[in-house]
Amino acid sequence: MRQIARRVRELVDSGFFELPPGISATAGDPLAVVDPAGALESWFVPFTASGKLVAWARMLPDLTPLEFSLLAGGRTDLAPDAADWLDPARIRARISAAAGDAASLPVLTYDGAPARLAWRAYSHGGSRRWWAAGTTVWEDHGDWEVTGGVESGSRK
């Protein structure tokens, strides 16, 4: 993980990852993003300021930069609470409340495509799969393809 943190610092210092002027965000501990089989897909590196998630970077396992996202236009006052995205205990509690049952420990992965980062957990003895992104929680009802919030596919 030190290599990831070092590489992210290099990318910020070089201007490759650019935070808005006046924002003093700290790069947090990298989180593993796993694919559906549980293998490492990428590293998620959050940037936080005053308890808010202001940006994040994703790095491939070989430390190649994959993407960088600035949230709320770089406005800390409009950025989401970091814990809603980064705290597995808070995420688990939110999923458990939606499921009406204790959820498993969430895993950072993606819902469908790798660009759709979300936490995945199971409830009801593993028979129900749940997703969480920020304060939003949804149950996986099958292999629906959803793009832009509209169901555009059918169950496989």
Image (spheres, rainbow, N blue to C red):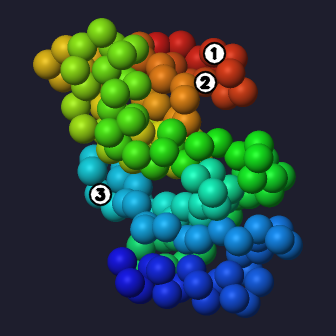
23 to the left or right of 32: right
Q: Which mark is residue 46?
A: none
Alpha carbons under labels 1 and 2: distance apart: 5 Å
Task: Name the N-terminal-most of marks 1 and 2.
Answer: 2
Task: Name the N-terminal-most of marks 1 and 3.
Answer: 3
Alpha carbons under labels 2 and 3: distance apart: 24 Å
Task: Name the N-terminal-most of marks 2 and 3.
Answer: 3
Rendered image quadrant of residue 153: top right
64 to the left or right of 106: right
| Residue 138 visible somewhere in the drawing | yes
Pick the front one: 151 or 94: 94
Mark 1 sits on what residue? 151
Alpha carbons under labels 1 and 3: distance apart: 28 Å
Q: Secondary structure at mark 2?
A: strand
Instruction: Point out residue 26 in the picture as x, y percentages from the top left corner.
Output: 59, 71
Mark 2 sits on what residue? 146
Number of marks drawn: 3
